[in-house]
Image (cartoon, rainbow, N blue to C red):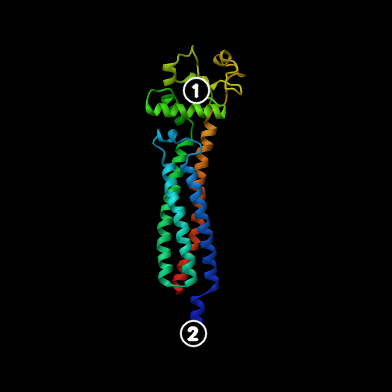
Amino acid sequence: MASTAAAEAEKGSPVVVGLLVVGNIIILLSGLALFAETVWVTADQYHIYPLMGVSGKDDVFAGAWIAIFCGFSFFVVASFGVGAALCCRRSMVLTYLVLMLIVYIFECASCITSYTHRDYMVSSPSLITKQMLTFYSANTHQGQELTRLWDRVMIEQECCGTSGPMDWVNFTSAFREATPEVVFPWPPLCCRRTGNFIPLNKEGCRLGHMDYVFTKGCFEHIGHAIDSYTWGISWFGFAILMWTLPVMLIAMYFYTTL
């Protein structure tokens, strides 16, 4: 009689059940946050997808699509896990563990994919500089996309080139083939402008006067945009994985006691 009561107490240990319930509630809330964060990434608020797509390193966005699935799955599976813990049913806990393991593996893939491709893009400005010089003003579909991207970035961020206006002077480019240096050494959108979008001094900009041309490069902004996307996918995803692992271990222990 006493042994039966002890077994029942062990089976329904309120401490273990409480840990599983709290742990899964945090996972399901984190899953919703991950879902929302990665939807924001796929919407490409910084409009830098063409820059990553032309390099073939757009898997940051592939990782985001995987994370959308994982975020929603974390919410659903963790909700099921709460029910499994409260019901203390062996079959439900086993189902929860199998499903959570599948989601866990997919989320690992999402985090690793996004981070490795981010590192490739922002570790050095040389890749982005090469793309800019190759495609800006090029008469191709990719060239038109990259030209619109760089025009928007240079206007909004008041920057010029990747590292500065001298990028257009020191290297050969599609822009240089279309516009000789004596005509304009860098794109006219590198010129400082009034509130009405009129160049302050077009001739001063052409001659490179510091007061009339943007001197900072755009790489800092582009790197920040890619880092923002990667934080939402990888670092937040890694944080969820670090929390989910001990919850799964507790669930495994709980399963052995049922």
Q: Position of residue 22 (x, y in %)?
A: 55, 64
Q: What element does badge 2 sit on?
A: helix
The residue beneath circle 2 is 3
Q: Residue furthest bottom?
A: 1
Mark with earlier residue (2, 1): 2
Q: Position of residue 115 (x, y in %)?
A: 46, 44
Q: Residue furthest top?
A: 182
- Specify the amino acid type for callout 1: Asp
The residue beneath circle 1 is 167
Q: Quadrant of the C terminus?
A: bottom left
Q: Nearer the viewer, residue 49 or 20?
A: 49
Q: Position of residue 16 (x, y in %)?
A: 52, 70
Residue 88's mark?
none
Can residue 65 be seen here? yes
Q: In the displayed structure, would residue 18 be above or below residue 163?
A: below
Q: What element does badge 1 sit on?
A: helix
